[in-house]
Image (cartoon, rainbow, N blue to C red):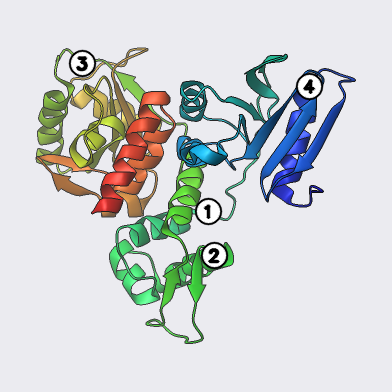
Amino acid sequence: MVITTQAGERVAQAIRAVLPAGAAVGLAGLDDDLIRVDVVGGRFTARWIGEGWLRDARDALADAGRKPEVLVARRMSPGARSAAADARVGWIDESGAAEIALPGLIISRTGRKDPKVNRSARWTPSVIGTAEALMLGTRPTVAEVEERTGLSAGSASNALATLTALGLLRSDAARGRGSAREVTDRGLLLDAYADAAIARTSALSLRVGTAGRDLIDELTSLGQGWDADGMAWAATGAAAASVLGPYLSEVTGLDVFVDAPTPATLDALAERSGLRAIEGGRVLLRPFPTPVTRRLCGTESGLRLAPWPRVYADLRVTGVRGEEAAEHLREVVERG
């Protein structure tokens, strides 16, 4: 079968890129994203898994009867690499990184970093905030998004139009503030949102030390002080997930959004809170990513928590265990 799909072509290109120069290779498509590869000394199957997150790898490995011997992705995350290793499956990504150990074929490459490309230009703060609200159950109408997010009618309308243009919402023929769209696929919306939310995260942050042994108790104490001062704050990452969908046995660091949008206000907040800046400190303070995120925060078990989609996005980029915790949180929310 000739390789005709875009996924198949990307698999073929990634494989050729990591094989030794001049190596003879034969490629044949078996289905839309599965390729049979013939090289000197053997044959294996390779499957395209998209972005290369842990969930993508798990989905590809779930069908034991059709499990590929090599996974291929745009960029394999640490969690996806770990899942492949656990399944004794090789992997390749488009950075040129690869780990393959098959009879007659051993490849180990580190790859190279992607150049900085803004793939989230259409994901403005209003679009990100609107996506968060939709995943929290807001109906995709201008009126309901405006009410839930605090955005203007114009911003809400533009955000919904952008999500529709991205294929994440479907629009009916009606027009007006109450006309309804619908989410085409909640999983796709979450994945697209999470990628964009992290890509647009501000570099501004401050690491501070804490003397407390129990970080959740420490956060509760800090939060009480911030509440008394009337300052908005919310936990994200592992601390928030320990409440929303417990998975990790221990919270070893705090990631906290605070109402401090500049370096000066962030430093002042830390000083007022009795926190000292220290490299490698266990508490990370950073500004709220968007005004909508701040508005959508809630309180549970005495803690202010960021919206669960933001917690998921932040967890997913904190290594293997963080990505596992993110997927657990997603499953908890999906089960209701």
Circle 4: residue type: Leu
Which dot, 4 or 2, sits closer to the camera? 4
Circle 2 residues within 10 Å: few <14, some 14–19, many ≥20 = some
Q: Earlier in the sequence, mark 1 or mark 4?
A: 4
Circle 4 residues within 10 Å: few <14, some 14–19, many ≥20 = some
In the image, residue 257 sits, relative to residue 152, either above or below, namely above
Is residue 37 found left or right of 334 in the rendered image? right
Question: What's the mark number on residue 249?
Answer: none
Taking the spot 84% from the left edge, 28% from the top edge, the residue there is 25
Q: Which residue is mark 4?
A: 19
Front residue of 322 and 219: 322
Circle 3: residue type: Thr
Residue 249 percent across, percent down from the top left? 21, 23
> Residue 252, located in which quarter of the rendered image?
top left
Taking the spot 41% from the left edge, 34% from the top edge, the residue there is 316
Q: Which residue is mark 1?
A: 123
Q: CA distance from mark 2 to mark 1?
A: 8 Å
Which dot, 3 or 1, sits closer to the camera? 1
Q: Earlier in the sequence, mark 4 or mark 3?
A: 4
Q: Earlier in the sequence, mark 3 or mark 1?
A: 1
Taking the spot 67% from the left edge, 33% from the top edge, the residue there is 45
In the image, residue 163 sits, relative to residue 291, either above or below, namely below
Q: Earlier in the sequence, mark 4 or mark 2?
A: 4
Q: Are marks 2 and 1 in contact (CB under 8 Å)?
A: yes
Q: Which residue is mark 2?
A: 162
Front residue of 180 and 126: 180
Q: Secondary structure at mark 3?
A: loop
Q: CA distance from mark 4 to mark 2?
A: 41 Å
Is residue 75 found left or right of 158 in the rendered image? right
Q: Are marks 4 and 3 in contact (CB under 8 Å)?
A: no
Q: CA distance from mark 3 to mark 1?
A: 35 Å
Q: Earlier in the sequence, mark 2 or mark 1?
A: 1
